[in-house]
Image (cartoon, rainbow, N blue to C red):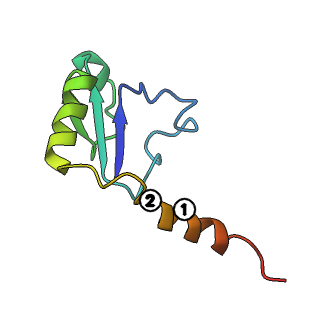
Amino acid sequence: LLICVGARLDPVVTAYNRAEFGRHAQKIVVDIDAHELDDKTDLPEATRLALDAGDFLQGLRGALGPAPLAGSHMSWTEKTITSNIPSQ
């Protein structure tokens, strides 16, 4: 899943190939400017939403439910760091 909020997805961001950008991802593009979304014809499979970024993020936050308890990411962080250190 690729969610672009307020990003123009200009050629530099998409490596000059929007058609192949995130080619295996489900894409959601959010922009307050509907005309900017209309310009993204080379992203035909993307869901385009003409919304204010703050409104979109508030709605997404509400849909996701309460945040996990603070510090709950530590086990993931520790696992990631230790799994990337080569054994000696």
Q: Which residue is drawn at 40% across and 60% down?
A: 72
| Tag 1 secondary structure | helix
Q: Which amino acid does label 2 sit on?
A: His
Residue 34, compared with residue 26, is above or below; it is: above
Residue at the spot x=54%, y=62% of the render? Answer: 77
Residue at the front extreme, as displayed = 70
**Tags 1 and 2 touching, CB below 8 Å:** yes
Mark 2 lies on a secondary structure that is loop
Q: Residue 73 carries which label?
A: 2
Q: Which of 77 and 12 is in front in this view?
A: 77
Q: How far apart in space, not on screen, are marks 1 and 2 (Cα)? A: 6 Å
The image shows residue 75, relative to residue 12, as above or below, that is: below
Residue 63: x and y, percent? 14, 46
Q: Mark 1 points at which residue?
A: 77
Along the viewing direction, whichever of 70 and 54 lies nearer the viewer: 70
Q: What residue is shown at x 22% (from left), y 21% (from top)?
A: 52
- Number of numbered labels in the structure image: 2
> Which one is in front, 27 or 18?
27
Residue 57 spot, x, y in % from top left: 25, 33
Q: Indicate left or right for 22 with 27 as reference.
A: right
